Amino acid sequence: MILELKQTEKAEGLFEGWEETLIWSCMQGVMGKIYADSLENPASAMAVLGDFCFLAGKPDKEMVQYGPKPGKKNVMIMVPQNEEWAELIRECFQEKAKEVVRYAIKKEPDVFDRELLQTIVDGLPKEYELRMMDEELFRHCRKIEWCRDWTVQYKDYDRYRKYGLGAVILKDGEPVSGASSYSGYRGGIEVQIDTREDYRRRGLAGICGAKLILECLKRGWYPSWDAQNQWSAALAEKLGYHLAYEYVAFEV
């Protein structure tokens, strides 16, 4: 039986050493949920936040199958703690599980060059406007499919204001690029960056990212970055991050 674990500290040991802020969000009770095979002495656990699912502890087939909810999401990104979990995902979902490579970025709070980041921000062409995410923008971005991930994990603006942060570039009053918090935890955010397709390759994502990092540093927050692809990893390195390692995930 798979149960929602309210006393998340019971699963702490299963996720130990896994530096994923989405797991931290779930463990802290800020957002997301922890599921386990036991409420008192879990051997297997799963952290679920948004489109992501992290599987830890003793590989459990029932846990793997419990993860994705058909009809609720188009794709669930399942991240196995080890190869044994990965084999179970392949076995359970077969051709429905697309194996992908993602790029973990080192968490180095003191690595950022503020002057460099400010120089990047100052490079914004005059025809654009750069704004921090306020309630008006929050509500507007939630209605736009391509940038919904900037706000969708937050139930309302009050929650976003407490655990989120975002920088948005507008053209003629409409968002064309932005860097925001996919999720938040106590002490930082997980960065989500996207640019509208017709405005890509103009350096806008880097400007948003630089602004968001600077604002996080002002608050004493850490802007955590996990790269979906090589382009995202390269942008992260341009802004001062360093690659930690590649890892396998499954888009189910």
Image: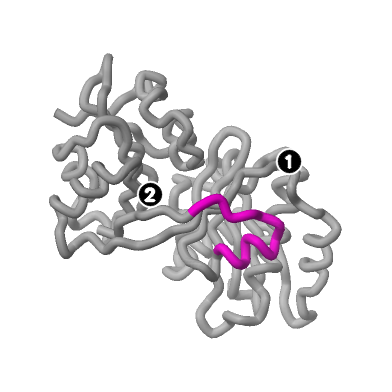
Q: Which residue is mark 2?
A: 50
Tell me: residue 9, above or below residue 217. above
Gap in angstroms between the C-alphas marked 2 and 1: 25 Å
Answer with left or right where residue 145 lies relative to residue 210: left
- Residue at point 58%, 33% (across, down): 186
Tell me: residue 33, above or below residue 191. above
Q: Which mark is residue 219?
A: 1
Q: Give the structural element (helix, strand or loop) at label 2.
A: loop
- Residue at point 55%, 73% (across, down): 195
Which image quarter holds the C terminus?
A: bottom left
| Chain part drawn in magenta | 233-245
- Residue at point 77%, 44% (across, down): 218
Name the colouring of the figure.
one colour
Specify the farthest residue to the right: 115
Dot 1: few (<14), some (14–19), or many (≥20) neighbours within 10 Å? few
Residue 39 in the image: x percent, y percent?
Answer: 26, 19
Picture quarter containing residue 127?
bottom right
Q: Please state which of residues 53 and 233 is positioned toward the viewer in this rendering.
A: 233
Q: Verify CB contact (< 8 Å) between mark 2 and mark 1.
A: no
Q: Amino acid at mark 1?
A: Arg
Q: Amino acid at mark 2?
A: Gly
Residue 241 within the magenta-colored segment of the rendering = yes
Residue 200 in the image: x percent, y percent?
Answer: 57, 80
Q: Give the structural element (helix, strand or loop) at label 1.
A: helix
Residue 90 in the image: x percent, y percent?
Answer: 19, 54
Which image quarter holds the N terminus?
A: top left
